[in-house]
């Protein structure tokens, strides 16, 4: 198994180290456009092997040729929104970046599974799918895993229980339009609604929607990377080990939930072939409406980019 991580920033570097420590690949390649950064970080990680007890070879590079014959490619590259930059500006700039990255990936790997982390997540997953020409099952966005992890952690904190006993789904787009599904949220099988009042649940849902910006506000200059990296690696582990995990990921819907030809976060079964099944839950009317509204926003942005990615 060979795994390439594009982008040696905080998310990419943290993910690369987790992949090595979990020994999910024989070789991990860390690629970035900045000379010396991927090489230095990769060497530092590799030298931790005798202590962390892994034998994975980690290579840092500025050359996409080193990604040749990758089985999985994790894309974390892209710009963060800066003061004075509109969302439209960010969308255009990152679209150009992801288009170039995907072209380079496909130049050297014939049939990889691409996992997208770059923002805006759902739109960038669409860009990678369109540019790569890969089957829809092999281009997956990491959003729901992260959003659900935040939801679960906030519930665990509020109830003072183990995170491992909490099952939940957060669907829809990654951002303000995400849709936490309270109906399918439970603690050791007990519905959440039996353990806390609606007002408290609503507050946790709202905190989940703002989970990313809460961290940004603390850091001042930077954004979350530990939880995003862990979430991406959970998806990679499900693929590498063919675990058939049921987790929320961004995938191309073809009529499910009344949504057609749009990438959206829904529960899927993940295994060695990528997305192996889309699960269609029985959502409440307001939840389904929110999910469709979230997908409509993604679709609108994607259509505005057709001239760039065609």
Image (tube, rainbow, N blue to C red):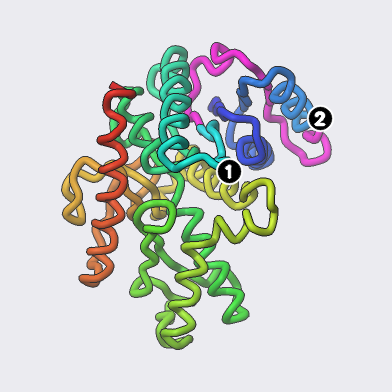
Residue at 70 percent of width and 17 percent of height? 35
Instruction: Report if residue 153 lies within the magenta region.
Output: no
The residue shown at (26%, 43%) is 299
The percent coordinates of residue 128 (x first, y second) are 38, 29
User: In front here: 248 or 242?
Assistant: 248
Q: Is residue 199 left or right of residue 276?
A: right
| Labelled disc at residue 91 | none
At x 61% / y 40%, what residue is drawn? 11
Q: Is residue 59 magenta?
A: yes
Q: In which quarter of the image is residue 99?
A: top left
Quarter of the image with the C terminus in it: top left
Kindly tell me whether residue 34 is visible in this rendering. Answer: yes
* Region of the chain picked out in magenta, as a range: 48-74
Label 1, on which residue?
A: 83
Q: Residue 47 carries which label?
A: 2
* Local SS, label 2: loop
Q: Is residue 244 above or below residue 192?
A: above
């Amino acid at each position: 198994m060979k795994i390439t991580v594009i982008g040696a920033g905080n998310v990419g570097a943290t993910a690369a180290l987790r992949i090595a420590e979990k020994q999910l690949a024989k070789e991990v390649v860390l690629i970035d456009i900045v000379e010396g950064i991927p090489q230095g970080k990769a060497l530092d990680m590799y030298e931790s092997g005798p202590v962390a007890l892994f034998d994975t070879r980690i290579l840092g590079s500025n050359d996409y040729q080193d990604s040749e014959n990758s089985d999985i490619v994790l894309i974390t590259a892209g710009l963060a929104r800066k003061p004075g930059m509109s969302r439209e500006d960010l969308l255009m700039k990152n679209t150009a970046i992801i288009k170039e990255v995907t072209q380079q990936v496909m130049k050297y790997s014939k049939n990889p599974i691409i996992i997208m982390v770059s923002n805006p997540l759902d739109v960038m997953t669409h860009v990678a799918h369109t540019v790569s020409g890969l089957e829809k099952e092999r281009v997956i966005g990491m959003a729901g895993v992260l959003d659900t992890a935040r939801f679960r952690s906030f519930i665990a904190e509020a109830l003072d229980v183990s995170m491992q006993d909490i099952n939940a789904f957060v669907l829809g787009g990654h951002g303000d339009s995400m849709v936490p599904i309270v109906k399918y949220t439970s603690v050791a099988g007990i519905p959440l609604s039996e353990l806390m009042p609606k007002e408290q649940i609503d507050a946790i849902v709202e905190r989940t929607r703002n989970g990313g910006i809460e961290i940004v506000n603390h850091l001042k200059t930077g954004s979350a990377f530990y939880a995003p990296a862990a979430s991406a690696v959970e998806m990679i582990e499900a693929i590498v080990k063919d675990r058939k995990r049921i987790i929320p990921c961004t995938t191309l819907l073809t009529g499910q939930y009344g949504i057609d030809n749009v990438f959206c976060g829904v529960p899927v079964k993940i295994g060695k072939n990528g997305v192996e099944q889309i699960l269609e839950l029985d959502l409440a009317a307001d939840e389904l409406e929110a999910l469709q509204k979230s997908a409509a926003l993604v679709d609108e942005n994607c259509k505005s980019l057709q001239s760039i990615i065609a």
